[in-house]
Structure formats: structure tokens, C-alpha cells
Amino acid sequence: MPQHAPAARICRDCDGFPTVAITTGTRNGDGTRATLRVTCPACKGTGRSLPAAGLVRVGR
């Protein structure tokens, strides 16, 4: 039987595309478009969601 790879935890806010280039609509002196690089604030540019917090038993 084929082995299935475990599902990667992809960030639900950016769907695995953590860094994007957004054009500003203006052009540079050489004719290229001026762009801004923006990273996902939820995953901080990793593309993966943070691991779920585990339960911790405190005390007795």
C-alpha cells in the first residue's frame, strides 16, 4: 500500500504564499514597475501555521 505523507500545516491566512510583491502602479526610471514586498503577519513569512498549543498539567 502506498504511504501517505502527513499533511503540512499550511497557514490559513496566506495559503502557503507567505511573501508577495504588490505593484504600486508607478514605474522606476528604467521602466520596471515599483513593487513592495509584503510578508504574512500571521505566520511571519514561513508559510506554515504555528503548532497548536499542547495541554500542560500544572500542580498535582
Image: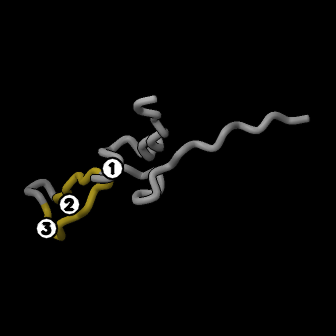
User: Label 3 belongs to which residue?
Assistant: 26
Mark 2 crowdedness (10 Å alpha carbons): few <14, some 14-19, many ≥20: some
The N terminus - image quarter: top right
Q: Which mark is residue 36?
A: none
23 relative to 58 in the view: left or right: left
Q: Are marks 2 and 3 in contact (CB under 8 Å)?
A: yes
Of the numbered discs 2 and 1, the one sitting upstream in the chain is: 1
Mark 1 crowdedness (10 Å alpha carbons): few <14, some 14-19, many ≥20: some
Mark 3 crowdedness (10 Å alpha carbons): few <14, some 14-19, many ≥20: few
Q: Which-is-in-front pick, marks 1 and 3? A: 1
Residue shown at the point (63%, 44%) measured from the top left: 7
Residue 11 versus residue 59 in the image, above or below: below
Q: Position of residue 30 (x, y in %)?
A: 13, 54
Of the numbered discs 1 and 3, the one sitting upstream in the chain is: 1
Of the numbered discs 2 and 3, the one sitting upstream in the chain is: 3
Q: Position of residue 2 (x, y in %)?
A: 86, 35
Residue 53 versus residue 38 in the image, above or below: above
Q: Which mark is residue 33?
A: 2
Residue shown at the point (44%, 46%) measured from the top left: 49
Residue shown at the point (46%, 58%) measured from the top left: 12
Q: Secondary structure at mark 1?
A: strand
**Disc 1 marks which amino acid?**
Thr
Q: Secondary structure at mark 2?
A: strand
Q: Position of residue 15 (x, y in %)?
A: 47, 56
Q: Secondary structure at mark 3?
A: strand
User: Label 1 belongs to which residue?
Assistant: 19
